[in-house]
Image: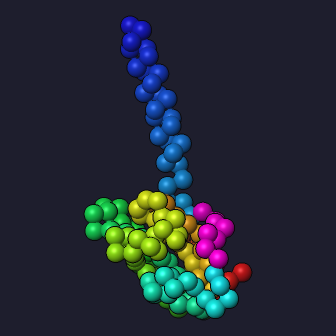
Amino acid sequence: MIALGVLAVVLVVGAGIGIMVRRNEGRVRDTAPLVTVPADGPSALLTAAGVLAGRPTVLHFSADWCGPCAAVRRVVANVVAELATAEAPPLDLEVDIDANPALARELNVLSLPTTFLLDAAGQERFRIAGVPKTPDLRRSLAELARSGKSE
C-alpha cells in the first residue's frame, strides 16, 4: 500500500515537472541579441544562410529527421505569405542544422525546431523553441515587417 502511495506521488510530481518544462514551448519570447551585429550588417554565417540587411527574417533550424519541423514550415510559410505586402516583407529561411552546425553554434541552438525572428539589421529580436503559435508569430513578425528597421 505504501508503495502505491509513493508511486502516485512520484507520478504527480513527474507530471508537474513535465508541464512546467513544456509550458513555454511554441511561445514567442523576446530576446536580448546573443550575436552583436556589426555596423556593416549581419555576420558572415547569417549572410551565407541568406539573411539580407534591410529585411526582417524568419530563420528556422530544421533537419530531415525532425518531425515537428514540418509543422514549423507550414506555420511560418502561412504567416510570411500574409505579410507579403507589408512595408518590409519578411524573408523565410530554413537552415538544416546538420549542414550548418557553425551557424547553429553561433546562435546557440540547443534543440529542434528553433525559430528566430531577426529585424532588418539582422539582430535577433525573438526566439521560439518548438512549433510557433500562429497568433504570436503573426503579431511579432508584423511588428518587424511594419517597421522595416531595427529598433
Regarding residue 83, the answer to whether it shows in the image is: no
Residue 115 located within the stretch drawn in magenta: no
Residue at 42% x, 8% y is 2
Q: Residue furthest right?
A: 151
Could you tell me residue 72's position as x and y percent? 40, 68
Residue at 38% x, 14% y is 4
Q: Is residue 130 above or below residue 37?
A: above
Residue at 47% x, 40% y is 18
Q: How many marks?
A: 0
**Viewport quadrant of the C terminus:** bottom right
Tell me where the magenta segment starts and ends, as one range. 29-36
Could you tell me residue 83's position as x and y percent? 52, 84
Q: Is residue 126 above or below residue 40?
A: above
Residue at 40% x, 20% y is 7
Regarding residue 14, the answer to whether it shows in the image is: yes
Is 53 or 147 nearer to us in this picture?
Answer: 53
Q: Is residue 92 above or below residue 60?
A: below
Is 86 or 16 nearer to us in this picture?
Answer: 16
**Majority secondary structure of the magenta segment?**
loop
